[in-house]
């Protein structure tokens, strides 16, 4: 309206009275349509940019999740644990070949379980307890009389699920942050 007023009164030298008398809504149909399409185009560009930014954020989240899973898997069984286990195995081979064989079997079961569970979000409590028992038996062979453990044999909820290797992390921290000796098993 203001542009039309400026055009008619200032540019075409019409009077304000003359402009207002000849003014009707049909004069604004074309400009309204043009305004609608310009506004629609601006909004489409804005939503397209927002959509692309969300896709980039989503890809970053997916990449971050994959990286976190990789790091988690790398850290599941501590490299020091493997190094210490191989040292124990080395000494058991000379001292007690039968225990060395059991130790090797338990160690392979632990790593097999880690590989089998790497893509699972949850596992049954029974599976995790069986793994924890194998893990603790391995630690028992390593520390002998310096460690004792007791696992539950029955539990109420057979449908209960936990994050894979969560018990291993707890058990590892229990050993790591406590004194392990025959005087204080």
Image (spheres, rainbow, N blue to C red):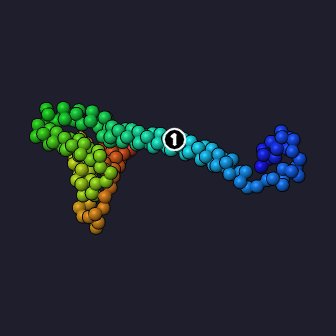
Question: Is 92 or 83 nearer to us in this picture?
Answer: 83
Question: Is 138 or 111 nearer to us in this picture?
Answer: 111
x and y, in percent, of residue 95 in the image: 14, 35
Q: Is residue 71 visible?
A: yes
x and y, in percent, of residue 131 in the image: 24, 50
Q: Secondary structure at mark 1?
A: helix
Total count of labels: 1
Question: Is 46 on the left-hand or right-hand side of 30?
Answer: left
x and y, in percent, of residue 129 in the image: 26, 55
x and y, in percent, of residue 99 in the image: 14, 41
Looking at the image, which residue is at 64% across and 49% down?
33
Looking at the image, which residue is at 26% across and 64% down?
158
Task: Read off the residue under disc 1.
Answer: 53
* Image quarter of residue 138: top left
Question: Which residue in the rendered view is the most extreme toward the bottom?
Answer: 156
Question: Is 28 on the left-hand or right-hand side of 55?
Answer: right
Question: Is 39 or 144 nearer to us in this picture?
Answer: 39
Looking at the image, which residue is at 50% across and 44% down?
51
Q: Is residue 72 visible?
A: no
Question: Is 78 or 163 nearer to us in this picture?
Answer: 163
Looking at the image, which residue is at 80% across and 42% down?
7
How crowded is the residue under tag 1: few (<14 C-alpha within 10 Å), some, or many (20+)? few
């Amino acid at each position: 309206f203001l542009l039309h007023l400026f055009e008619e009164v200032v540019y075409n030298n019409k009077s304000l009275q003359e402009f207002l008398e000849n003014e009707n809504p049909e004069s604004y149909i074309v400009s309204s349509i043009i305004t609608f399409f310009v506004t629609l185009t601006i909004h489409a560009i804005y939503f397209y940019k927002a959509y692309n930014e969300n896709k980039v954020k989503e890809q970053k989240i997916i990449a971050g999740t994959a990286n976190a899973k990789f790091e988690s898997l790398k850290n599941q069984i501590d490299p020091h644990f493997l190094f210490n286990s191989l040292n124990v195995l080395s000494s058991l081979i000379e001292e007690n070949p039968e225990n060395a064989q059991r130790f090797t079997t338990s160690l392979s079961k632990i790593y097999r379980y880690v590989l089998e569970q790497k893509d699972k979000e949850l596992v049954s409590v029974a599976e995790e307890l069986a793994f924890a028992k194998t893990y603790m038996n391995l630690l028992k062979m390593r520390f002998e009389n310096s460690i004792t453990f007791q696992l539950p044999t029955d539990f109420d909820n057979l449908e209960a699920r936990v994050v894979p290797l969560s018990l291993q992390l707890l058990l590892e921290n229990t050993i790591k942050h406590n004194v392990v000796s025959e005087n204080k098993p």
